[in-house]
Amino acid sequence: MSKIIDFFKKTFKPRYIYSLQRFEPIKDNGFYILKELGTHTCIKATVEDIFDSELLYNINPADIIFITQFEEYDMREKQKFEIIEERRDLSFTIQNAYYRREISGKELLIDQDIVDKLDPTSLVRIAYMSGLKDGRKISDEISRAEKIKSSNPTKLKVIK
């Protein structure tokens, strides 16, 4: 009989009081919405509130794992760079959620941290434009260094 009573206690009184509401938006202005089990009461909590207080012990572990994965994804997205401005001298202004930086095309392609966090299509465009600019410089230097000599006109003979 005590086993049946324990079963009903576990069923109707779970260990975790709060569960994450997984409807869009999952994170609204930095707050997660947590619903209290058995009632219609909801609380809003930030990640700091969840992990720095006793609230952590009252949330379902599956929801805590989901929150940490969501925060990790959100942090990776905030670290990605976007090209804000492109100038004619092949210098760029790039920006992510944390800071803004002005950088030339060559420096941008050499810096591995930026390459990892920049959109691949933008990287291809920058590499193409940098190579095109360097190629034009080399071509101009060669044409200045070597004047193309006009060849002597050769006389062609018609063979019948």
Image (cartoon, helix red, strand yellow):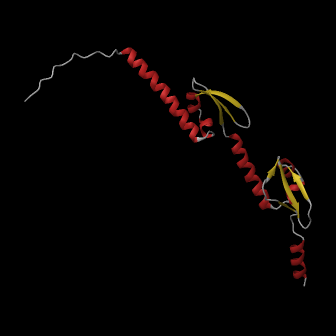
Residue plotted at (58% across, 24% down): 88
In screen coordinates, is 54 left or right of 26?
right
Residue plotted at (41% across, 22% down): 139
In the picture, the quarter occupied by the N terminus is bottom right
Asked whether 10 or 133 is in front, the reply is 133
Asked whether 152 or 24 is in front, the reply is 152
- How many numbered circles does the render carry? 0
In the picture, the quarter occupied by the C terminus is top left
Q: Position of residue 123 (x, y in %)?
A: 56, 37
In screen coordinates, is 76 left or right of 120?
right
Res 154 quadrant in image? top left
Q: State whether residue 2 is above or below residue 93.
A: below
Residue plotted at (90% across, 80% down): 5
Q: State whether residue 65 is above or below residue 3.
A: above
In screen coordinates, is 34 left or right of 89?
right
Q: Position of residue 80 (x, y in %)?
A: 67, 40
Considering every residue shown, the one lying at the far left of the view is: 160
Res 116 quadrant in image? top right
Q: State whether residue 156 is above or below residue 26.
A: above
